[in-house]
């Protein structure tokens, strides 16, 4: 919210408008953030949400939103003035805006409006250049289609070089821990299950442990945990090919050949679908990170932790929950959770350590982080820090993650990491060893750096502090 306030304060003080594109995953809290900011600003504001309606319905709804608002132009609309075009409506919305009466104009689900009104970007650009940019107003364009929202500011688009961008990210593990009253390890476990979605954190409730939350969520077919992913996927990726590919990756088929086999789709369809999902931020393609190129060993991953968990444990089984057999999903969770967690924790661990870089005292030359595996799967190293991407010229460290409930990182674990170290191209006998553990370390463990769950969560907390 601090960025929104800074932009609005600057617009109010300078008398020049600010145009901001706000993007982020669906249900991550973009609309609520904008609503709370506008409501607390003590300024007039208009909040309009596009709904993909036909014909002039969207324009009529925009006019009604202005009419119901505290905008200076609202009184004219209540008196019967009805603009007949989007250009006229935008111009009227900006009427009467002064230093004494600044305005916040929010257009939520902007991609929906673009889909129904292909010329709306050009119309907004025209009104912005002619009227809005010289008035103390903040215009927020909000959207969940991240690829489309990023494209708004591309060269050749009407709003190019006029927009500033703001990304609303899911809650970090640190924020989840603070919100739910969980220790660091518990916060990271919660993040692996609900991601950073505020609505799921609100459903969790402070003080509950993971199993307590899932016992309720997986036995209630109306819980946000059960229905949110289904609704999000249906809205963002309605095509059958997209769902098939996501389901394959979520079930563990991460190599291209495995996805091809699991889906039964043609190579062309799989290629196009993967690229579309990648552009929209749903999946990522990861190659082994070292000083050597290994493109044919790449793996595909689900980016969002909640969607990843949901695809593994819930997808295709909602009928069991509806029939009162959610306990079967809980049993599957109990059996599979240790192994699932051991793999899934790599994502937030890498992200947290990247927040700590650069740190030459602990991580040497590392500025970037990845992991390494060979083609046959006989060598896997959880963490590899290097100086450049996509290929490292120098390796700063190699590391291992042991995310176990009761057993600490042992001497044997460190020796196993040391044995694998020379298998990483660019690493050698002097390359530092980093260990990450949720249950501490044995005293005689030969590691150069030890990181605990508290260290990881503190990295997010420090990053949030720097951002504000």
Image (cartoon, helix red, strand yellow):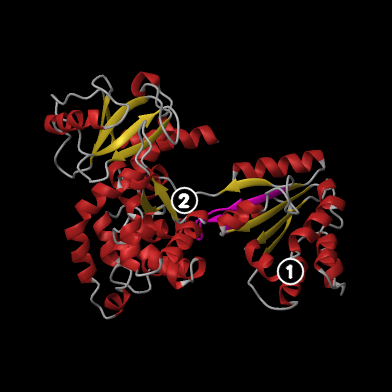
Q: Position of residue 342 (x, y in %)?
A: 24, 47
* Residue 139 in the figure: left or right of residue 26: right
From this view, report whether residue 440 is shown above or below residue 307: above
- Name the residue nearer the viewer: 196 or 230: 230
Res. 309 in view = no
Query: Residue sitting at 35 percent across and 53 percent down?
Result: 206
Query: Residue sitting at 50 percent across and 49 percent down?
Result: 169
Judged from the image, the secondary structure of the residue bearing numbered disc 2 is: loop
Instruction: Compare marks 1 and 2 and give the one earlier in the sequence.
Output: 1
C-alpha separation, residue under disc 1 versus residue under disc 2: 29 Å
| The stretch drawn in magenta includes residue 340 | no
Instruction: Report which residue position mark 1 lands on.
Output: 62
- Name the residue nearer the viewer: 43 or 154: 154
Q: Position of residue 21 (x, y in %)?
A: 65, 51
| The stretch drawn in magenta includes residue 27 | yes
Instruction: Report which residue position mark 2 lands on.
Output: 170
From this view, report whether residue 454 is shown above or below residue 281: above
Judged from the image, the secondary structure of the residue bearing numbered disc 1 is: helix
Q: Answer few, some or many: residues within 10 Å of disc 1's Cα (few below 14, many 20 plus, some between 14 and 19).
A: many
Q: Which residues are magenta?
A: 19-31
Q: Answer few, some or many: residues within 10 Å of disc 2's Cα (few below 14, many 20 plus, some between 14 and 19).
A: many
Among the 4 quarters of the image, the one containing residue 112: bottom right
Q: Position of residue 179 (x, y in %)?
A: 40, 48
In this view, which residue lies farthest toward the bottom? 323
* Residue 28 in the figure: left or right of residue 371: right
Query: Residue sitting at 30 percent across and 49 percent down?
Result: 344
């Amino acid at each position: 919210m601090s960025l929104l306030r800074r932009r609005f304060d600057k617009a109010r003080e300078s008398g020049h408008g600010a145009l901001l594109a706000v993007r982020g995953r669906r249900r991550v809290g973009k609309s609520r953030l904008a609503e709370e900011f506008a409501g607390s600003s003590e300024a007039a504001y208009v909040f309009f949400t596009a709904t993909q309606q036909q014909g002039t319905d969207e324009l009529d709804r925009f006019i009604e939103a202005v009419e119901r608002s505290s905008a200076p132009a609202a009184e004219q609309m209540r008196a019967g003035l009805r603009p007949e075009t989007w250009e006229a409506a935008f111009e009227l919305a900006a009427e009467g805006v002064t230093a004494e009466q600044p305005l916040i104009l929010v257009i939520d689900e902007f991609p929906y409006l673009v889909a129904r009104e292909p010329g709306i970007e050009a119309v907004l650009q025209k009104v912005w250049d002619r009227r809005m940019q010289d008035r103390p107003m903040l215009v927020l364009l909000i959207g969940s289609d991240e690829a489309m929202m990023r494209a708004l500011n591309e060269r050749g688009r009407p709003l190019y070089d006029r927009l500033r961008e703001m990304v609303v990210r899911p809650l970090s593990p640190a924020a989840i821990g603070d919100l739910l009253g969980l220790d660091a390890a518990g916060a990271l476990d919660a993040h692996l299950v609900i991601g950073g979605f505020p609505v799921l954190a609100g459903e969790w409730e402070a003080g509950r442990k993971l199993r307590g939350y899932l016992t309720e969520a997986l036995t209630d077919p109306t819980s946000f945990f059960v229905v949110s992913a289904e609704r999000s996927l249906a809205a963002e990726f309605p095509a059958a090919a997209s769902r098939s590919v996501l389901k394959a990756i979520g079930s563990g088929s991460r190599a291209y050949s495995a996805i091809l086999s699991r889906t039964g789709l043609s190579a062309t369809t799989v290629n196009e679908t993967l690229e579309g999902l990648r552009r929209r931020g749903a999946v990522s393609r990861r190659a082994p990170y070292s000083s050597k190129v290994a493109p044919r060993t790449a793996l595909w991953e689900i980016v969002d932790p909640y969607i990843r968990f949901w695809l593994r444990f819930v997808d295709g089984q909602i009928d069991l929950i509806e029939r009162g057999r959610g306990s079967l999903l809980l049993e599957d969770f109990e059996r599979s959770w240790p192994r699932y967690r051991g793999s899934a924790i790599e994502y937030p661990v890498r992200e947290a350590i990247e927040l700590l870089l650069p740190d030459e005292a602990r991580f040497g030359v590392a500025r970037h982080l990845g992991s390494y595996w060979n083609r046959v799967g006989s060598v896997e190293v959880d963490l590899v820090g290097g100086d450049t991407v996509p290929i490292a010229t120098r390796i700063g460290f190699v590391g291992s993650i042991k995310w176990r409930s009761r057993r600490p990182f042992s001497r044997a674990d460190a020796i196993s990491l040391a044995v694998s170290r020379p298998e990483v191209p660019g690493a050698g006998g002097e390359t530092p060893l980093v260990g990450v553990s949720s249950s501490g370390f044995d005293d005689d463990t030969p590691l150069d750096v030890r990181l605990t769950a508290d260290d990881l969560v503190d990295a997010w907390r420090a990053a949030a502090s720097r951002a504000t």
